[in-house]
Image (spheres, rainbow, N blue to C red):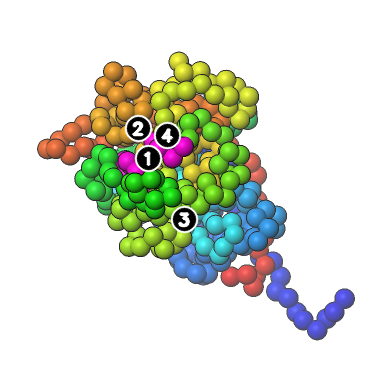
Amino acid sequence: MSTSHVFPPQIRVPATYMRGGTSKGVFFNLNDLPIALQEAGPQRDAFLLRVIGSPDPYGKQTDGMGGATSSTSKTVILSKSMQADHDVDYLFGQVAIDKPFVDWSGNCGNLSAAVGAFAINSGLVDKTRVPDNGIAVVRIWQKNIGKTIIAHVPMINGDVQETGDFELDGVTFPAAEVVVEFMSPADGEGALFPTGNLVDELSVPVDIASNGVLEATLINAGIPTIFIKAEDIGYQGTELQEVINGSPQALAMFETIRAYGAVKMGLISHVDDANLRAHTPKVAIVSEPKEYVSSSGKTITTDMIDLNVRALSMGKLHHAMMGTAAVAIGVAAAISGTLVYEAAGGDERYSHSGNVRFGHPSGTLKVGAQASELGGEWQVTKAIMSRSARVLMEGWVRVPKGAF
């Protein structure tokens, strides 16, 4: 073995690998990170990229903790909250798979379900707020978008209860139910409808729409999301992953729609800047209820759902539904006149303050939202859904010292 070069050793950093909803990621306590990484910046990003195993030209993340999908290329950093009346500050980083980029522009709604459990297990929640048995109400400050999330974490004999019989489509095994409330979920400081319209005419290239225009609902709720009608771009709304993810032409089309929608929403100044915020906005297609067979082989009948939704994340069709996009669906479904509201049956089927159940590639999901119109503008108090979470592994991640 050559001794002409001395290579730096690996360092060990405490970490927990957790599933939250239909996502999983590597969780860190801010105070456990090396001092140089406790502040945001290129060093921290380089560290997280190496932890996850990106960028990977093979698209597998074999040399890291990522799972080579947008749902599994995720990192979370938690700390005691600096905000009044909150327990924990939650920072989410979406790690790109094929390029050296960590996107901090939005939240992960699925991993939000795991934040409360990690915070309790890490001692970030005052013990007086955590019952030995019952429900611990963890007040989370979502730093990426400046919003409050409330997680209702079941406790048993002083420990977080992870096992249970709650089933979530897109997750193989049942677990304990975690109710998650997204408070005032209009994203960041932006308006709920950034253009002021419930439906916009979105200009796109003529190879996407013959007249160069698509109807779209552009909404900032949970995460900035672009909703379009499936039929307008030649889809049914019942597609599974391979139909879209197996087509480079389809993926390019959706990315183009996403870029034009991001400009319309004021998130970027030019379509060429869309790659600078790959995590947001999301783009989704909606359709009226249609029967289909989910990826698990279960038949989803029209009486089980109010509408069908398919959403893309980080350039690929999601295998189920992003939690933040589910918030956007719930909010848009509660507001008369949006494309989501109309797909769910309009005034005949849906009320402003109820729940909506939608079909996604893995099955169904129910989400509720409270919306009201005040002074000609829609206001949303909160959106609520049930998820589950579980610790998969805990210990240390190892990263070559010279990687950051």
Main secondary structure along the magenta-highlighted residues: strand
Instruction: Confirm or deny contact between disc 2 and disc 1 (CB under 8 A).
Output: yes
Which residue is denoted by mark 4 in the rendering? Answer: 231
- Residue 296 in the image: state x and y as whole percent: 62, 27
Q: Indicate which disc, 4 or 3, sits on the residue closer to the N terminus.
A: 4
Q: Indicate which disc, 3 or 1, sits on the residue closer to the N terminus.
A: 1
What's under tag 4, amino acid-wise? Glu
The residue range painted magenta reads 214-234
Name the image quarter holding residue 201. top left
Mark linked to residue 278? 3
- In the image, 125 versus 204, the foreground residue is 204
- Relative placement, left or right, of 76 versus 150 is right
- In the image, 105 versus 309, the foreground residue is 309
Q: CA distance from mark 3 to mark 1?
A: 17 Å
Which residue is denoted by mark 1 in the rendering? Answer: 227
Residue farthest right in this picture: 1
